[in-house]
Amino acid sequence: MEYQNILVSESEGIVTLTFNREKALNALNGQTMSELEHLFAHDLPGRSALCGVILTGAGERAFVAGADIKEFLSIEMGRGGQLAQRGHDIFSLIEQFSRPVLAAVNGFALGGGCELAMACHLRIASENARFGQPEINLGIIPGYGGTQRLIQNIGKTRAMELMLTGDTFTAAEAHQWGLVTRVTTPQDLLPEAMALLKRIAEKAPIAVACTIASVNAYFNKPGAGFREEVIQFGKTTQTADFLEGAQAFIEKRKPRFTGK
């Protein structure tokens, strides 16, 4: 597959994947999701010398600012659940990957971008990073695993408040709450990411893979919570409030929700 929206480079057994839609703040559209799926399902597994993977965003403003809202508006009525399930399946490829995957968050990681970072095994952030699940501002809910993984990372009460208000939070707060393990300057972000994965690369590869599999098993990925998210996301995409919220986002105005 020829990649159009992601850049892939390799150095010393570590692959760096850069989301390369800087003008769109690296938002996840259908093409990007297909490329991400192909990379983790078909490309990376065949690299026998692979030690780890870094995910980051092009430019200084965004890791991944979220899903492409204009594409969301083209969702056919009743197909929102299928969209969410596809996101789950692709992000699960990352979560279940046998080599460590690290999100080097260099700016906005909102909505699908925050969910993508949480699907990675490790996360570090630059000082200018901002996180959040603001989907409620569009009249929908997180649909790529956010309702489950945010709770796993920062606890139910704080996650509930953030998802119900749509508030964003800083890199310092993400570190304080345990979402990221360290905060760096923007210049030090990728060198720190490389250094961390090189440390892990010195360990026994089978033990690394078994650790990843064992930790993932604790959270029971096929469980009811993820299935319920798909159902509820699909329900919200069939509402007038979603159409209003998405249109308001594109028009940069406050939405007028009616509960319909």
Image (spheres, rainbow, N blue to C red):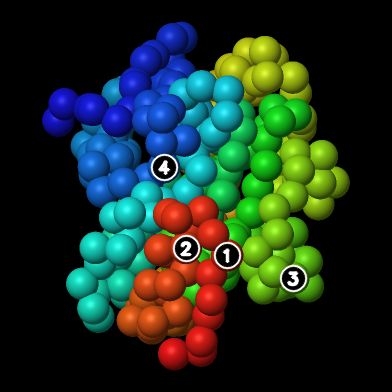
On screen, 56 above or below 244? above
Give the quarter of the image for residue 84.
Answer: bottom left
Dot 3, crowdedness within 10 Å: few (<14), some or many (≥20)?
A: few
Gap between marks 1 and 2 measured at Cα:
6 Å
> Residue 248 — which label?
2
| Extreme-right residue of the structure | 176
Residue type marked 3: Glu
- Return the disc, 4 or 3, that comes first in the chain's sequence: 4
Residue at image position (51%, 43%) is: 65
Marks 1/2 in contact by CB < 8 Å: the verdict is yes
The picture places residue 173, in percent across and down from the top left corner, at 81, 46
Is 10 placed above or below 1 here? above
Spatial separation of the CA atoms under disc 4 and disc 3: 24 Å
Q: Nearer the viewer, residue 229 or 112?
A: 112
Question: What residue do we see at 71% from left, 65% from top?
Answer: 162
Q: Which secondary structure, mark 2?
A: helix
Observer-side mark, 2 or 3, equals 2
- Is 152 on the left-hand or right-hand side of 88? right
Kindly state the secondary structure of the residue where label 3 is placed.
helix
Which circle marks residue 161 in the picture? 3
Query: Please, what secondary structure does the residue beneath circle 4 have?
Result: loop
Mark drawn on residue 27: 4
Report the amino acid beneath label 2. Ala
Label 2 crowd (10 A; few <14 / some 14-19 / many >=20): some
> Are circles 1 and 4 on residues that touch, CB within 8 Å?
no
Residue 72 appears in the rendering? yes
Amino acid at pointer 4: Ala
Dot 1 surroundings within 10 Å: few (below 14), some, or many (20 or more)? few
